[in-house]
Amino acid sequence: MTTKAVRIHAPGGPEALKYEDVPTPEPGPGEALIKQEGIGLNYIDVYFRTGLYKAPSLPLTIGQEGAGTVVSVGANVSNVQPGDRVAYAGAIGGYATERTIAAERLVKLPDGIDFKTAATMMLQGMTAQYLIRHTYTVKAGQTIVVHAAAGGVGLILCQWAKYLGANVIGVVSSREKAELARANGAAHTIVGYDNLVAEVKRITGGAGVPVVYDSIGKDTFGASLDCLAPLGLMVSYGNASGPVPPVDIGILAAKGSLFLTRPTLATYTAQRADLEKTAEDLFDVVLKGAVKIQVNQTFPLKDAAAAHIALESRKTTGSTVLVP
């Protein structure tokens, strides 16, 4: 028995993604086999494809997010059973028609959330949840900066922060994306990075902001620090423009006793109870309509390379789903 998967045999460009037959996996103890109905596209997939993040072994089936139906379970699995509608994020091996996964990393989907939406909301949505509910607890009346505000995480952050009563300054790369960010809750938008600091200072009356959420990395790190008020928090959670170079921590003192963190979803959901709470919080705001997951691009799984090209060239907005 075989299934289809997209694998890399060596790091490289989009052409490194190979759509091929692989043996259908069997669930071991503590695992579930799921038939996937949708697979999320995320920038971390690019990091593994290029080698920025080291593959645990090769060939590697990349992909960190998906949704589908449980087909079978191994020994000692009690939280899911065959027929359950489930979703996950953070478990590599997602670019496949069928896959096995540790059952404890699966969460059951509420009836009101379909597979396509679920497949693209778990990683981005749970990332947004921990960023604004745990890494920094955003409060009503605060003004915050969100980079890539028209991207998958960015659109969710804009909506969720507005729901919490905050004012979002969304940073984007085009006027079209600025319109999209504003339509999703951004009170202000800034196109490009050239005038970022001056615009943030103007909007905040010179005060700066208490937190910056930066998924861009190298190109925006310095400017993001300069947007912060004294004792502000720089949240660097992605590297879309490349990794941030080594930092002299003395600049944190010079710029106002700033805080700096590089968080990951894996840490914030490492414990089963935390995973469940994070997912439940996300499901709650989606079911309420406070956060709308926008699946703006759909690609067949076999065309994963084209999806990567679109993502890296900043031609995507919102979320992208790969359909097996």
Image (tube, rainbow, N blue to C red):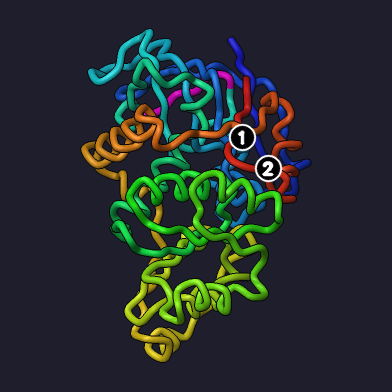
Check the image and report above or below for 54 versus 193. Answer: above
Q: Which residue is mark 2?
A: 316
Secondary structure under badge 2? loop
Q: Nearer the viewer, residue 312 or 214?
A: 214
**Identity, as a three-letter code, of the amino acid under mark 2:** Thr
Main secondary-structure element of the magenta-colored stretch: strand
Up-down: is 156 above or below 36?
Answer: below
Q: Quadrant of the C terminus?
A: top right
Q: Quadrant of residue 23?
A: top right
Q: Position of residue 62 (x, y in %)?
A: 58, 38
**Horizontal placement of 169 versus 70: left or right?**
right
Residue 120 picture location, percent across and down: 52, 33
* Structural crowding at the residue carrying mark 1, measured as other residues with C-alpha within 10 Å and reported as few (<14), some (14–19) or many (≥20): many
Q: Position of residue 117 (x, y in %)?
A: 50, 26
In the image, what residue occupies the spot 55% across and 34% down? 294
Q: Which residues are magenta?
A: 97-102
Residue at 50% across, 34% down:
293
The answer to whether residue 164 is left or right of residue 127 is: left
**Callout 1 secondary element:** strand
Assess whether residue 64 is covered by the magenta stretch: no
Q: In the rendered view, does 93 fall on the left or right side of 306?
A: left
Of residue 270 and residue 16, the one placed in the foreground of this image is 270
